[in-house]
Amino acid sequence: MFNLILRRIAIAIPVLLTVITLTFLMVHSAPGGPFDEEKAVSAEVLAKLNERYNLDQPLSVQYFDYLSGVLVGDFGPSFRYPGRSVTELISIGLPITFELALYSILFALCVGVLAGVLGALRPNTALDYIPMSTAMIGICIPSIILGPILILIFGIWLGWVPVSGWGYMPGDKILPILTLGTAYAAYCARLTRGGMLEILNQDFIRTARAKGLSETRVVVVHALRGGLTPVIAFLGPAMAGLLAGSFVVETIFGIPGLGRFYVEAAFNRDYTMILGSSIFFSFLIVSFNLISDLVAAALNPKLRD
Amino acid sequence: MKLKYLALTICLFLFACGENIPPVDSSTETKILYLGNGTEPKDLDPHTVTGVPESKILMALIEGLVIRHPSGLPPIPGIAESWDISSDGKEYTFYLRDALWSNGDTVIAQDFVYAWNRMLMPSLGSKYPDMLYDVVNAEKYNKGLLDDFSLVGVKAIDDKTLKVDLKNPAPYFIELLAHYTTRPVHKATIEKFGEMDSLGNQWTRPGNFVGNGPFTLEEWKLNQVIKVKKSPTYWDADRVQLNEIHFLPIDNVTREDFMFRSGRLHVTSTVPTEKIEVYREEYPDQINITPYYGTYYYRININKKPLDDKLVRQALSLSIDREKITEKVAKGGQDPAFSFTPPDPNSYFPPTKLEYDPEKAKELLETAGFSSDSLPTIELLYNTSEGHQKIAEAMQQMWKENLGINILLTNTDWKVYLSRQNTGDYEIARAGWIGDYQDPKSFLDMMVTGRGNNQTGWSNADYDNLLIKAANSTSQKERFSYMYEAEKILMDELPIIPIYTYTRIFMKHGSVKGWNPNLLDSHPYQYISIENK
């Protein structure tokens, strides 16, 4: 196990370095700069700004300066927001994105597992078909379409919930969680149903039933433990996907999360912010994959060496 | 059983949310104004920001010598109670009223001297220093040709008297003083959090901010909300009827529309183009279309062939059916452009009305020695946006039909679009300009040789001279007559082809009173109230 962790960390370092180098080269080769504005700035002002943000140095110097900063945890100042560092922006956005991802995955688990279990208990009945076809639709509708539809129905026509924001008004977290969580709930439902169907046909379940245990106890205590294995394996990548992919939902609902800062930084040529968030997202994805590998290894001894 | 409980919980949850009263509905009691404010402000430092969203917030937080008139008439006294102007129009003496900063300090004339010094410091990198270039030696100081600020024409005679010397009479000077870049800042606060010229100074954060305006900064949640609260120290606090204003940064038109419809906003910053017609029919009392001091135009790079030929540019302009564009394409109540400067019914009215005459256009093209076969394909550059795309397509079709010119449409993201214009790497580019102050100078100065926003490569000595003469004229009438002549040259040479005059299109809730249409779309919040419809 220890070897596995060491090996994965050894791989992670060149991965992150490649991400930094490629992103650095790409942002600097993109046409247009952070200080291009509609009201043209004079050459003197532009020179001052470039000097202040170290952009007057040769690219190689900038690159090594940046790398040495990153090593000590300094991601530099944001170009878009004077007076705010990239670290500050990430620390503003990350808790919100994380909260959104966490609630969405909880929603996905609750709804998905329930629907999956029901489907598996009554296979090929309405109780199976309806949730499973809804799940299929859920997987197919992208959040960019689902979001506005939910806003129209629940936010505008029915007027039940606020249409945007995050913690600004009571209830404004509901629609984003539904939008982001639906596809994952659908995956969970299908994975649970598959896992449960396999387990429910096994001998130990028949034994449990024969011993006269209640159906609830059979399902919740005996079957679910095994039936949920595929769902647990899915959680790691799902969490990484939720964190990195939340920017669409953040944009639709105006949520001030990290995803929105990231996209905005790209449009504004906020070099340091683009780099900082890229590094951060890569780090998250690498970590979640590592965790998910470790969990898989813990469950399956064959994977340990 | 479990399912039943779950269903019940969900129902209860949704029902509980259903009890929410939209903020706009309760605002007659709370007196909180909710405004859609475009993109997230970069900062709230009046000397370094440039955007419209920033200007809307700064209007609540800091007051200058004068404030904009709520109905668009000439500016009215702000911190300056009154002022004298010498007979040659070059000496301004401002008499300050008893006003306080939000920390209780008195606003003094030295605050203005300090602020203007800061704004003009080359090391601060302000993008609007030209607002004060009419002041004696201001330009030299800003360009680093002069180190001693005491030689710049702004002096505090005593705590309550500010004297400004101009290098030329500038009848629009009072207009400039309503712009946020000329407003004072609180010296002790700036220097508590950094140097006088340090960029990204933390003084603009809530808790640190010291202003002298009708509101104080309460909260700034990035990408979420900026809340300002009625200031008890404001000199005219009795007039202020709002308790708070929430500026919501919304850069997505559709979301802003959803928010307005669900009662989260009183006033939006725009309206989705496809909804304009529907809302005009269904909500005529909520949709507002008002004239705006801005021009939508096409910039021509005159260093590129065949666009270096004036006749070709004239032919291009003559073959644009501007009425068709405003009525069938833009559809937001815009007016076909008269000229570069938007017409101001109360003062300057530009000289031309740009014609549509395809026959004459063809003749001009032939005179210039071109036929439809011999003309190369011309590239039309615009930043990615549905509105610009529709207009570009209409132009492409008109130029093809009327002149046989092939136009290649290129859309790029905002920064690429700006950078290509800055470096002259374009042939024709869409552009727009909103006047910073209500005077033709705000437009015509841009086309002077070598100015940062000229970007066309166009240079005309007669034009430059007429604007210098205008700057030195003592009477407004004389000044306008020079500008009129200059604009005639501009519209004959056509380094820019005006298309339409902007309108401001926005939704406004019926409970908002005192929000009067004006050309600069400026609405001092002390004149706004929320009342039952």
Image (tube, coloured by chain):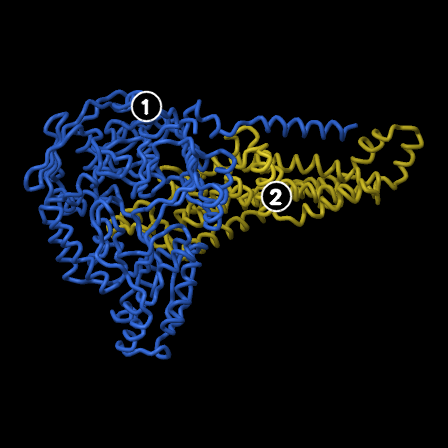
Chain colours: A yellow, B blue
Q: Nearer the viewer, mark 1 or mark 2?
A: 1
Mark yes or no: residue A74 visible: no
Quadrant in which the C terminus of chain B is drawn? top left
Q: Is residue B400 above or below residue B87?
A: below
B220, A172: nearer the viewer: A172
Q: Residue B503's x, y, as percent?
A: 35, 48
B348, B91: nearer the viewer: B348
Q: Chain of mark 1?
A: B
In the rendered structure, the answer to whether residue B414 lies left or right of residue B123 reads: right
Residue position marked by numbered label 1 in the rendering: B231
Q: Is residue A252 above or below residue B417?
A: above
The numbered mark at residue A6 is 2
Q: Residues within 10 Å of mark 2 (few under 14, many from 20)?
A: few
Q: Residue B227's x, y, as percent?
A: 40, 29
In the rendered structure, the answer to whether residue A121 lies left or right of residue A256 reads: right
Mark yes or no: residue B386 visible: yes
**Residue at left offset 11%, top offset 44%:** B169
